[in-house]
Image (cartoon, grey):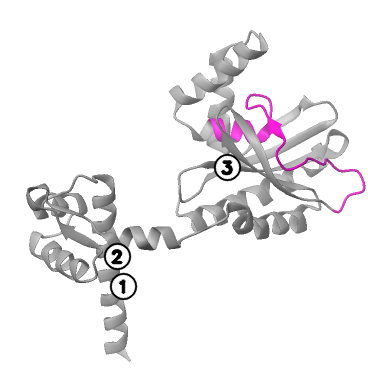
Amino acid sequence: MKEDAALTRGGIQVISRAAAVLRALREDPNGLSLGQIAERVGLPRSTVQRIVAALQDERLVFAAGSSGIRLGPEVTALAEAVKFNVVDICRPYLVELVKLTDETADLSVLRGQSMIFLDQVSGMQRLRAISAVGDVFPLTDTANGRAVLAALPIETAQGLVQAEWDQRGSTHSWPAFDQLLQRVREEGVAYDLDEHSPGISAAGVAFGDWRGALHAISVPIPTSRFDQQREVVTAALLKIKAQLAATFGA
């Protein structure tokens, strides 16, 4: 049994090291030498040489002459076979969120300068917020938009925020809004307190998928019961956010 456990650990280590080599090559599609790979993954050159040889046998990498080692054709074939729909993947999380809160749960994605509504699971409450797939939400006064802005580099977020303000003809203070985003980064959850749609408040969290696209899961609540639900909803969103991070490898 001890020998089997040792073999299992060794096999897992080999897979982990091979994945590290493939990721290093992904970051430099023009190719890397064995020495460069070894430096980037923190492994001895001899170990990297053995891993690369095994990956070459599987057509996962190939030697491109003077350019060094590059990702091979089998990687492309595997990538094309991986078809994932973020709506299908996130639907169970929306359902769980509804079970935890009794409130409606929304999924949206950052596209250009707006959040695009992708999916919704209705809550159990008689009075609830309803949106339609394809609806467009602004970034600066919505929970989902603010959550995504807080997940972006500050310069990128500032550019999107200023573009939205300019489009609306609004005058706001970037330093004050940046402080709001900093609170979102620290707390992990963004809020819209009756700011986007009168009578509706919301809380939301952001996450990135395997392709790097930024999404948000949010919970819109009639403002009349938001305060009493805020603690429960915040805890549920943070739980779901951790699960999403595990799923998408964030």
Which portion, as a residue range, is magenta?
Answer: 124-149
Q: Secondary structure at mark 2?
A: helix
User: Which residue is at 8% across, 64% downward?
Assistant: 46
- The residue to which callout 3 is attached is 215
The answer to whether any part of residue 182 appears in the image is yes
State if disc 1 and disc 3 touch (CB < 8 Å).
Answer: no
Pinpoint residue 70: horizontal percent, then vertical percent: 20, 53
| Type of secondary structure dominating the magenta stretch | loop
> Which callout, 3 or 1, points at the residue further toward the start of the chain?
1
Q: Nearer the viewer, residue 139 or 13?
A: 139
Observer-side mark, 3 or 1, equals 3
Three-letter code, disc 3: His
Observer-side mark, 3 or 2, equals 3
- Measured in 3D between alpha carbons, the distance from the residue under mark 3 to the one under mark 2, in whole angstroms, is 28 Å
The image quadrant where one finds the N terminus is bottom left
Residue 13 lies left or right of residue 78; in this view the side is: left
State if disc 2 and disc 1 touch (CB < 8 Å).
Answer: yes
- Tell me where residue 199 sits by quadrant: top right
- Residue 134 on the magenta segment: yes
Pinpoint residue 93: horizontal percent, then vertical percent: 65, 57
Where 58 sits versus 141, above or below? below
- The residue to which callout 1 is attached is 12
- The residue to which callout 2 is attached is 16
* Furthest-right residue in this view: 126
Local packing at callout 1 (Cα closer than 10 Å; few below 14, some 14-19, many 20+) is few
